[in-house]
Amino acid sequence: TQTIATGDVVVSAPTAQAPNGFLRKVIGIKTENGKTILETAPATLRQAIQKGSLDVTRALTEADIESTQLAGGVSYTPKLRPQATNPTFSFNKVLFDKDGDTNTTTDQVVLSGLLDLATSVRFEWDIDFFPPDFDFLAEASFTQKSNLTLKGKVDFNFVKKIRIGEVRFRAITFSIGPVPIVIRPVVKLDIGVRGSASGAVDVSVTQTLVIKAGAKYDEEWSNLSAVTNTFTVDSSSISAAINAEAFANVTLELLLYEAVGLFVRPEVFVAFDAQVPRKPFWKLDGGIGVDVGVEIDKWGIEKEYNTRVFEKRFPIASSPSSPPNIGLDFFGTADLNRPIALTAFANDFEDGSNLTITWTSSQTTDGVLGTGRNLNKTFSTIGTRTLTVSTTDSDGATATQSKILNVVNTAPVVNISEPNSSTVIFQNSPRTFVANSEDINEPNNQLACSSLVWTSSQINDAFPKTGCIIEAIFSSLGARTLTVTATDSQGLSHAKTVAITVLAPPVNQPPNQIVISSPAPSINLGAADGIVTLTGSATDPEGGAVTLEWFGAIQQLDDFGTPTTAYGTNIKLTPNALSKVNLFQVFNLNPASTSSTSVNIRITLVAADPQNNKSSFSIVVKYIKPVG
């Protein structure tokens, strides 16, 4: 029986109680209940071996797997044995779930794929303390094949890393003299994602990573690492901006007895970066970083070794130039000679909204429409035409969009202010008549007076007459109908009639030749403050003095200018010394109103002679309330 003393090093091959073997230094010995109990601390191989060497290379296959610990969503299916094949792991893991509800998937980031591993280890070790000499080489090689698919629809920042499995290979036992050297390879699998996103991403990348990572010690450390890597992109599509890295890391640790003696930790990632606008608007990069370290306490080396032996980031793919998107929006019908709002939009993944939009028309008489996102265009000819918007991005790609516009003409509307059904007309007494015609297709929305024609149903009357204001004298008694017809430049017309009766003049006639010179009959009052000047005149056939009084009444109109009520009661208008009156105050009209309702204002001048015989004359002006 060998006697154990304090300071001795105890070494064991793998056993049921110590599956990784052990390498311990005795620091104390005591006896309890007839049993000898050793107190130990970690030791180094340099303390156990004075002289010796080791040179071994070993490939690790599926047959060498002793156990696996896999997370949910990860599977490993052993292949048929005794084939010495590479282990392959499949996974489909939710890395991030914003609301914590696995049943809602629109807020998740999911990483799925395959990992295929081919691993080998190599050791060279030579030690001799007489004279002191120590050479050491540790190296691990493996080929990792993976297919990563990152899918998600997110609008937040995220960082997530998940350990999806751990694979423990059978212990490898060698001997230097009587001392067993126990090495157990362990592979740890991690996947994850980090970055930020707003929108959807779907990118799949196939990657092959070949690593030989290790270090050699011969008075100084030297790096033995080499890395090659290839990426291929299967597909990528986005709907907004995302900047994310999906990674799969395989860490290889070589346990010397129960502690890590050598580790190789590669970090392989796929970085997807998209931003609109930008050129290119999405980029896919690959990156590799490999860290190698040696546990100096275990090997007995006096100089630390823990370094990043390789790091590289390189482009994999980027988006090709994409054509711009363009569209346009306007009503399909426009009024002749009235402006219509034309709206278009254009954007480009690379140029954003920094694009020039050009408008054209299939109708040559329209001329050059212009450029820009918003146009106000007035068309001077009726009929259909095709409006087209076009844009060209910085790479020369173009986009166009078209829409049909029909320009229509609306018939005029005649208004007769004087005479009206209550007007008294005497034979051979001159009277002034007034009419106008609204026409939205004409300047100031009013048809020219030269386009108004007056006719009479009595063929002996001195008609036709042309104009907005005419003077008429009737030589015959009796009823007749006056008609005012307005015809626009496109040939559309509208007529309105008024029935009058010519009476025999009394001995003392009321005033005639009544005229309102201000305000003029108009389809728009045009007084922002409601103040107008009232001026007019009349003549007494008998030469007497004439007294003038002013009255007003209003009639409500709908949004289309159609009367909705009859004229209200006449209200007396009292001009000031300057002949001015505020119609807003008289009729309680509010210019700050947001209503688009308008009113007709009928202004009547009543003339009386000394015998109080009266006659009247009226005009109509329209007040359009501003739209706020």
Image: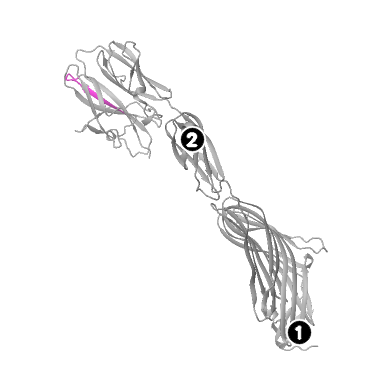
How packed mark 1 is, by other alpha carbons closer than 10 Å (few <14, some 14-19, many 20 or more), is some
**Residue 149 falls within the magenta-colored stretch:** no
Instruction: Give the SS element for disc 1.
Output: strand
Label 2 sits on a secondary structure element that is loop
Please tell me which residue lies in front, 422 or 622. 622
> Which of the numbered marks, if any, corresponds to residue 561?
none
In the rendered image, residue 52, in percent from the top left (x then y), is placed at 77, 82
Residue beneath the point at 32% across and 38% down: 591
Q: Quadrant of residue 531?
A: top left
Q: Give the extent of the magenta segment.
A: 601-612
Task: Pick the quarter of the image with the N terminus.
Answer: bottom right
| Horizontal and vertical percent position of residue 526 | 31, 33
The amino acid on which the numbered mark 2 sits, given as a three-letter code, is: Phe
Residue on which disc 2 sits: 331
Residue designated by label 1: 51
Q: Residues within 10 Å of mark 2 (few under 14, many from 20)?
A: few
Name the mark nearer the viewer: 1 or 2: 1
Q: Quadrant of the C terminus?
A: top left
Q: Return the x and y of residue 153 as percentages of the image width and height.
A: 59, 53
